[in-house]
Amino acid sequence: MTIIVGLMSGTSLDGISAAVVRFARDGARISADLLAYDVLAYDEAQRDRLARALRGGTPEEYCRLNFDLGELLARAAIGVIAESGVPRREIAAVASHGQTIWHVQGHSTWQLGEAAVIAERVGRPVIADFRVRDMAAGGQGAPLVPMADCLLFSAPHWRALQNIGGIGNVSVVPPNGGVVGVRAFDTGPGVVVMDGVTRALVPGMRFDLDGALARQGTAIEAVVEAALGDPYFAAPPPKSTGRELFSPDYIATFIAHCRTAHPAATASDIIATAVRLTARSIADAYERFLPEPVRDVVVSGGGAKNPALVEAIAALLPGRDVVRFDDVFFDGEAKEAVAFALLGYLHLTGDPGNVHTATGAAGPRVLGKLTPP
């Protein structure tokens, strides 16, 4: 058995998800036990600093942020190890995704969170920078969670695992798992537009809790249709996207389009329109690009905690069961941290971490770079 700490800071900029996971292997089959999970939430100053970095910064600002974020990632790792009760010497490695600052589709990617700082503070080996090897091999560098989806979360039937973090992404997994036949891609916005609209229109609110505001509004369909005209949605997989497309400028334009199309639109109407866009982008991606006989859709990430969004997705996918990851496995917020813990485990065993048919890479590759303690 091997115990790995997985760290993930996603596009929603909420905080660092940290998981302690014990892996065991029986031939080709890998099992994972979640021993502890925690979130180190960003405070407003940290969140604003990251958000500014996504819009631009000086070399000095990025240099400092890289080391400061390494300190935060180390703090998250130390905290979750303590919560697990596992002696630190028994942790084989810390697998850190870091924070994506920029992602150029099909070309390059950049994650911050200095691995050497994490290794120095935690005193354990650190595996980081997972995406670059796949991109060097001609892939998108994303999505990488499909390896966990097929090895850990498959079913006896075709299953779609839909993550709704800042960005939405789906993995289509064949019956009983295995890498052969897996496909995955980013469907478009997850909560990034919904949360951005909420923050812009409702002072003091970071997101629409339980979808309460969206339920009070009426979506403006003309705006949704226009937004879905962006070339990204029609582009066939493999494909990936991020905040470089769904940026603060995109959100400001989205709000302006809502007010132009419906001058009397309330904040709830505009939030409902953002929810509708997210749900439609997911459902449209399934109709365009998922010919497999998917029986159930397992949703995870922050968006899975928004009933208005989950219900909208279910209504657009008749004939498929839409269920929350939490109700099938464990807290869905931990899923991506567990996935990167798995990638760290595969790095140590010398096994590929990418599903190259999903990323578009030239072939399977061992992902990540190892920093010794």
Image: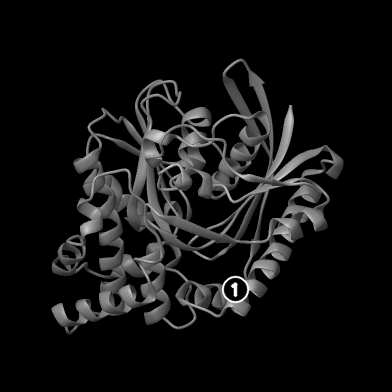
Image quadrant where residue 28 sits = top right
Residue 171 in sight from this viewpoint: no
- Direction from residue 127 to residue 214 in the image, left or right: left
Q: Position of residue 16 (x, y in %)?
A: 62, 59
Q: Where does the N terminus fall, quadrant-wise?
A: top right
Q: Position of residue 133 (x, y in %)?
A: 52, 44
Q: Amino acid at mark 1?
A: Tyr
**Residue visible at 45% across and 56% down?**
108
Q: Position of residue 19 (x, y in %)?
A: 66, 46
- Asked if residue 149 is positioned above or below residue 176 in the image, the reply reads below
- Direction from residue 67 to residue 215 in the image, left or right: left
**Residue visible at 45% across and 76% down?**
55
**Residue visible at 47% across and 46% down?**
136
- Direction from residue 319 to residue 251 in the image, left or right: right
Is 143 or 317 nearer to us in this picture?
Answer: 143
Is 218 or 14 nearer to us in this picture?
Answer: 14
Q: Position of residue 22 (x, y in %)?
A: 70, 33
- Asked if residue 6 is positioned above or below residue 262 in the image, the reply reads above
- Asked if residue 224 is positioned above or below residue 204 in the image, the reply reads above
Q: Which residue is mark 1?
A: 62
